[in-house]
Amino acid sequence: MPSQKQDYLLRLIEELGLLMAEVVKLRNQESHDAALHTLLQAQERLFARPAQEFMTRSIEEQLRLLVIGESTPNAREKCLMYAALLTEAGHIYTAREQTALASGAYQFALHILLLTALRDPAPKAAEDRARISSLLDLLSDDQLATEVQGLLGQFHAAGHDF
């Protein structure tokens, strides 16, 4: 029988999935402001706190806040969901022709995916590689921050190829 914490995570993922579907629908309808607003709501729901409490922090601090008290598998799921939300933000910014913001969102998502994959190598490593590869396809090498390039190097050194 699943624990209460596992039930909570499953409900949260289901709720965030519905919000994500709404975001995609709004983006496809070119309602970009509404899509970004819904995306912010999803992030606040994922963090269980107002955006002001996490958005100004470093990536590492955000991830720490995100996974406080979570089991390793639940923490991983929450990090993957955060990366998915940020990737969608990048798609919205791309649709709005705000390439710098899109690049930033994609790189932030990539950073989270790399940290997650390196901290908690999963049996689903192929899925990690696919997620990372899809984000790399959206970014040029000259857009990658030094820290992200370093994480990519660590990821490759750990035997992960694309």
Image: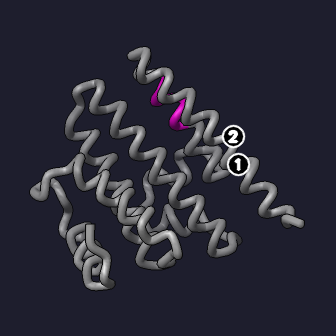
- Residue 15 horizontal/vertical position (percent): 69, 40
Q: Looking at numbered disc 1 in the image, what kind of residue is underneath it? A: Leu
From the viewer's perspective, tell me whether residue 146 is left or right of residue 106: left
Q: Which contiguous range is marked in magenta?
A: 35-40
Residue 119 in the image, given as x and y percentages of width and height = 47, 79
Number of other residues with Cα within 10 Å of mark 1, as a class: few under 14, some 14 to 19, many 20 or more: some
Residue bearing mark 2: 15
* x 46%, y 30%: residue: 36
Q: Main secondary structure of the magenta part?
A: helix
Residue at horizontal 55 percent and vertical 45 percent from the top: 43
Which residue occupies 41% across, 62% down?
112
Q: Which residue is mark 1?
A: 12
The crowd level at tag 2 (other Cα within 10 Å; few <14, some 14-19, many 20+) is: some
CB within 8 Å, label 1 to label 2: yes
Q: Secondary structure at mark 1?
A: helix
x%, y% of residue 106? 31, 49
Query: Which quarter of the rendering shows the N terminus?
Result: bottom right
